[in-house]
Amino acid sequence: MTTELAGRNAAAQPHVRPLEGKTALVTGGSRGIGAAIVRRLAADGAQVAFTYSSAKDQADALAEEVGALAVQADSADAAAVRAAVARTAEHFGGLDILVNNAGVAHVAPVEEFPLEEFDRMIAVNVRGVFTAIQSAAAHLGQGGRIITIGSINADRIPVPGIGVYSLTKAAVAGLTRGLARELGPRGITVNTVQPGPTETDMNPDSGPFAESMKQLMPVGHYAQPADIASAVAYLARPEARFITGTSWDVDGGFAV
Ligand code: NDP
């Protein structure tokens, strides 16, 4: 069967497990959006590994729940990220899908913004994404997928204090476009999903900004992590092979 026909058949059979036979690595998969992505990719048939930084108990519980492989690896530590990619590929015999989800945020006025926090956000949100992609690229083949969780704050800044966070998320959107150009000829797609406000420990929907955020969204409520995971799962599917280099806003209309 040609690749073209295989793509059509996948689209025509939405109830098959579309990621059967694929292996995925999700960074920062122990909690929040990352955990929802781990659950969804596993439900869609993928073998899944995920990294975490410190939440070992939650990581172990999730790994047991969905039969995933949990690997402790701080995204700021390039050697640890490389080792996590290598371990995933060795454990499952390959790697098809990389989801860069791990991310941190620090909010402060520009005059008071600690440079240590600036460096940490660059190290996790930007350098960590690059090192994961760099390591994974050696394993990804035809049909490979790289999906990075950016943020709608790359494009829209509704409150002060998040300029550095926005910088990191705009950086990965640029990296996505550049690497889509570079890896497309190898049959690998590279995309960014840009969530709007999503209920997690990082951004609880009862937090200090929550009511004003809801007013900015036509849908009037926060996303649940599963809403973001469903967009990631779609981009991971074989039928999404013609989508690359894009930043997909999954934001309840936050950006309109
Ligand atoms: P949470 O803080 O709820 O969860 C973060 C996850 O990332 C945890 O699993 C955590 O693991 C892991 N993590 C944090 N730091 C590191 C690190 N240095 N190395 C490895 N793993 C790490 O965040 P969210 O789920 O809300 O956010 C996930 C992604 O989505 C981030 O990139 C964030 O910027 C982005 N995003 C979130 C939005 C929101 O409204 N929630 C909106 C737009 C984008 P551990 O607990 O072990 O440290």
Image (spheres, grey):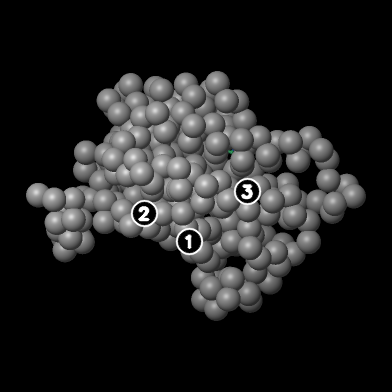
Residue 77 in the image: above or below residue 40: above
For the residue pair 118 and 226, the one nearer the viewer reads as 118
- The kind of residue tagged 3 is Ala
For the residue pair 100 and 181, the one nearer the viewer reads as 181
Per the image, the residue denoted by label 2 is 235
Label 2 to label 3, Cα distance in Å?
A: 20 Å
Per the image, the residue denoted by label 3 is 171
Label 3 to label 1, Cα distance in Å?
A: 15 Å
- 3 or 1: mark nearer the eye: 3
- 2 or 3: mark nearer the eye: 3
Asked if the beta carbon under badge 1 is closer than 8 A to the nearest atom of ligand 1, the reply is no
State if disc 1 and disc 2 touch (CB < 8 Å): yes
Q: Which mark is drawn over residue 248?
A: 1
Residue 167 in the image: above or below residue 58: below
- The kind of residue tagged 1 is Trp
Label 2 to label 1, Cα distance in Å?
A: 10 Å
